[in-house]
Image (cartoon, rainbow, N blue to C red):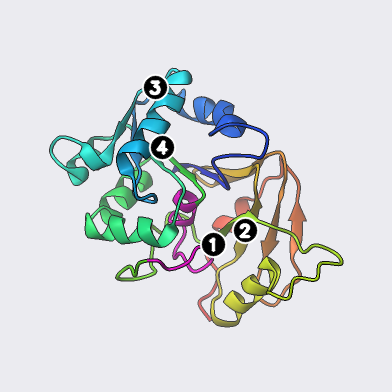
Amino acid sequence: MRLLLVSNSTLHGSGYLDHCAEAIASFLKPAGARVLYVPYALFDRDAYAEKARSRFEQMGIALDSVHDAPGGPVRAVEKAEALFIGGGNTFRLLTALWRERLVEPIRDRARDGMPYIGTSAGSNVACPTIKTTNDMPIVQPPTLDALDLVPFQINAHYQDPIPGSTHMGETREQRIAEFHQENAAPVVGLREGAWLLVEDRAVSLQGSTGARLFRRGEAAVEYATGSRVDFVLDRPPQV
């Protein structure tokens, strides 16, 4: 598999995909791919697709959208050279993927080697489930099960606890601890500005901000940009 799983599509102080544009262009170079975009995470699919198309054209990459593809979305995925799923609301995205019967076609194509790019919600759905998203369940998908391209969970836009904060709500770290009270999968707290590059059994942490890895019953571990974290592809025991 070839996956590029980005925490966020816009980094403070820069424009849409600016912080990861070079990584995207490099990721797609071997395939010379025309990208199929999945805009289901936002309500206005036409506007979202146009935004992505304009940005990819700046990188010299052609982009089509699955939502208005001739022949329908399943056929478009089956023919796609590469796939990009953008950010937004993860519940809305997963609901649409199941409704349009795209979960299995995307899973099959990605496992067969089709390059897959996700940002935010698009990275969340690459995981076994969407149980570690930050989003509100504004719609109810038929299941929380997602594409299961990797055996770990991602918490996109991960934020570290702020020392001295008077906010009384749970931190991301506490929310992830709650997840591990009920689930075994490791969670990568992927800060804004960071992404994971998965190439077969090799996984590298890239970008500028690093990540934290949370495992059930263990202290969180910090990983810096450039770290190899291939071990996250080992499936945990389901206990």
Residue linked to disc 1: 153
Image mark for residue 211 = none
Badge 1 element: strand
Say whether residue 23 is left or right of residue 55: right
The amino acid on which the numbered mark 4 sits, given as a three-letter code, is Pro
Q: If you read the primary sequence from the N terminus, does the residue marked by circle 2 or circle 3 appear first?
A: 3
| Residue 114 seen by the camera | no
Image mark for residue 188 = 2
The amino acid on which the numbered mark 2 sits, given as a three-letter code, is Val
Q: Are marks 3 and 4 in contact (CB under 8 Å)?
A: no
x and y percentages locating residue 193 in the rendered image = 65, 42
Image mark for residue 115 = 4
Q: If you read the primary sequence from the N terminus, does the residue marked by circle 1 or circle 4 appear first?
A: 4
Q: Main secondary structure of the magenta part?
A: loop
Q: If you read the primary sequence from the N terminus, does the residue marked by circle 3 or circle 4 appear first?
A: 3
Quarter holding the N terminus? Answer: top left
The amino acid on which the numbered mark 3 sits, given as a three-letter code, is Gly
Residue linked to disc 3: 32
- The image shows residue 165, relative to residue 102, as above or below, that is below
